[in-house]
Amino acid sequence: MTQYRVGGYTKVEIKTNVREVEKVMSLRKLALATPLNVGGTTFNPEQLTVIGSIVEQGTSIEVTPFKQLYVLIDELNLTEAENKLASAGIIVLPAGFVTKNLQACNFCKGEEEAGLPFARRLDEVVSGLDVPTPLKIGYAGCALGTSEPLSKDISVVKMRDVYDIYIGGDVKGIKPVFAQLLLASISEERVIPVVQRLIAYYQTNAKGKEKFPKFITRIGFDKLREIVSA
Ligand code: SF4
């Protein structure tokens, strides 16, 4: 099996032996997610049936740490598969070196108080963008932060009517680093432009595949604060 990136997507080539005729099949790896909701990330039985019907038979469905399912689809059936997924209410994103869908909490305080409509807008804007290394963006509907916002590259935490933004979390390995406060008590209108500027600055200024926490350390919090506040 060969795996490589093409046109913003992860492509996989496998050799199959159909009736003793060997052929190379091009498969596209897609990341599937469901819209943010009260109660957390869920796939309903109908959605799972659709997913089962469009994946390449004989391949596995991977559950990622980003609350996504990775599936492999024959490129020849891609458009039809994407249409079926969209009709079933499933979000289709590229896999690999992109911003992941928003890693949000369960909105237990209710849609309004925990900011679900705003989190959905944020998710739409920041998911699936090409970046030097995969970027995890978190959201918590209150300071209890049960979605572990300090473990993410960028996190938005709703503090009643305003928002705090943290950056630089990296909890992989045995020397975890928690995200630090970049901006406190900013208005809802400012949040999306700030997150977009952070991503754009990372896209254009990272050195090769520099990880976001290392990038932040190199650039410095003060400089980043200046850039996102401009
Ligand atoms: S972060 Fe707050 S609103 Fe969100 S699930 Fe946890 S306790 Fe509930």
Image (cartoon, rainbow, N blue to C red):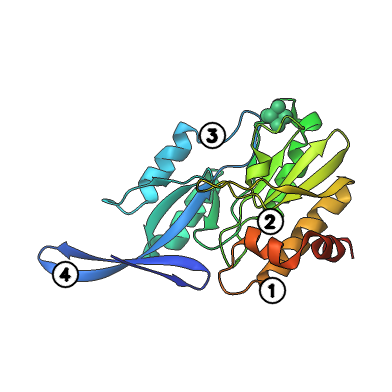
- Label 3: which residue? 42
Residue denoted by label 2: 126
Identify the amino acid type marked 2.
Val
Sooner in the amino-acid sequence: mark 4 or mark 3: 4
Say whether mark 3 is within 8 Å of ligand 1.
no
User: Crowdedness of circle 1 by 10 Å Cα count: few (<14), some, many (20+)?
Assistant: few
The CA distance from mark 2 to mark 1 is 18 Å
Q: Secondary structure at mark 1?
A: helix
- Of labels 4 and 1, earlier in sequence is 4
Task: Estimate the spatial distance between the alpha carbons at disc 4 and disc 3, rounded to whole Å.
Answer: 39 Å
Mark 2 or mark 1, which has the lower sequence index?
2
Residue assigned mark 4: 22
Q: Residue lying at the far left in this picture: please name it.
A: 20
Query: Is 33 above or below relative to 203?
Result: above
Q: Earlier in the sequence, mark 3 or mark 1?
A: 3
Q: Are marks 4 and 2 in contact (CB under 8 Å)?
A: no
174 vs 75: above or below: above
Mark 3 vs 1: CB contact within 8 A: no
Alpha carbons under labels 3 and 1: distance apart: 36 Å
- Say whether residue 168 is left or right of residue 42: right
Ligand 1 placement by image quarter: top right
SS at circle 2: helix
Image coordinates for residue 111, horizontal then vertical, percent: 75, 31
N-term mark: 2 or 3: 3
- Given residues 113 and 152, the one toward you in this image is 152
Nearer the observer, disc 2 or disc 1?
A: 1
Q: Residue at x 9, y 66 (%)?
A: 20
The answer as to whether callout 2 falls within 8 Å of ligand 1 is: no
Measured from the top left, where is residue 5 in percent x and y?
A: 45, 70
Residue 118: x, y in percent?
77, 43
Q: Quadrant of residue 115?
A: top right
